[in-house]
Image (cartoon, grey):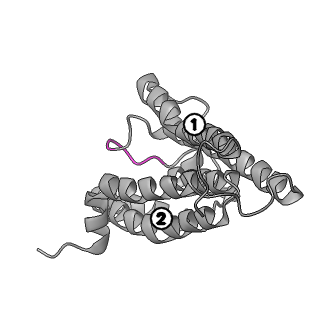
Amino acid sequence: MTVSIADAIAQRRLLLSWLLFVPLLTYIVFSGPSWDAHSYTALAAESVGFILLMAAVFGRVWCLTYIGGYKNGELITAGPYSLVRNPLYVFSFLGAIGFGLNTENLVATFIVFVVFVVYYPLVVVREERRLEERYGQTFRDYKQRTPCWLPRFANFSEPGTYAVKPAFVRRGILGSMWFLWLSLFHEVVEKLQELGAIPILW
């Protein structure tokens, strides 16, 4: 049986993520900012990056409030999933770009952007094929009215009450905090670079 590129990537998703993440983080640790750290450009990049990081953390927790514990049981179409079909990936993208801007490193930001643009659409192809096989016309109707990546705010709907599964939300919060921990990690790296403890190679 022929395995598509989307299937191959999805099956090795964790391994591929680490193969991309470790070299990128190593590059960031040993590279300097793309502009003067005390310039208005640096201030603007850090500010926008921080806003995107906050949006990512909030958005991922919001998504996991709805989908946590329900992912394989029913098709979720309310809350963030009424705006866009893949809100978790959208917010993860914002967080990744926010982290890139926070490092004040244009190369790192560009790499993150390219990885997401190439990688996640392939993941979505496989996931949506599986959802269509499971939910049939219900998913096709949802797919027709809800965009894949760019939110359609006129679609927004949310229930008055919703049964949340706390354990899944707790794990979602901890997972989403990685964006902030990475930002804190870079602040430490930046100070060590200024002190000469970490050499700037690029």
Task: Answer with the quarter of the image where residue 55 lies.
Answer: top right
From the viewer's perspective, is 172 left or right of 153? left
| Mark 1, secondary structure of its residue | helix
What amino acid is found at the position of numbered circle 2 in the picture?
Answer: Lys
Percent position (x, y) of residue 37?
79, 53
Label 1 or label 2, whichever comes before in sequence order: 2
Are the residues at dot 1 and dot 2 in contact (C-beta closer than 8 Å)? no
In this view of the protein, can residue 148 be seen by the observer?
A: no
Percent position (x, y) of residue 13?
33, 57
Based on the picture, tell me whether residue 74 belongs to the magenta stretch.
Answer: yes
Number of residue marks: 2
Tell me how far mark 1 sits from mark 2, CA to CA. 35 Å
Q: Which residues are magenta?
A: 72-76
In the orientation shown, which residue stands out farthest toward the front?
196
Q: Is residue 120 above or below residue 25?
A: below
Q: Residue at x 19, y 72 (%)?
A: 3
The answer to which of 104 and 131 lies nearer the viewer is 104
In the orientation shown, which residue stands out farthest toward the top?
166
Q: Which mark is residue 143?
A: 2
Based on the picture, tell me whether residue 202 belongs to the magenta stretch.
Answer: no
Q: Residue at x 28, y 56 (%)?
A: 134
**Residue named by callout 1:** 181
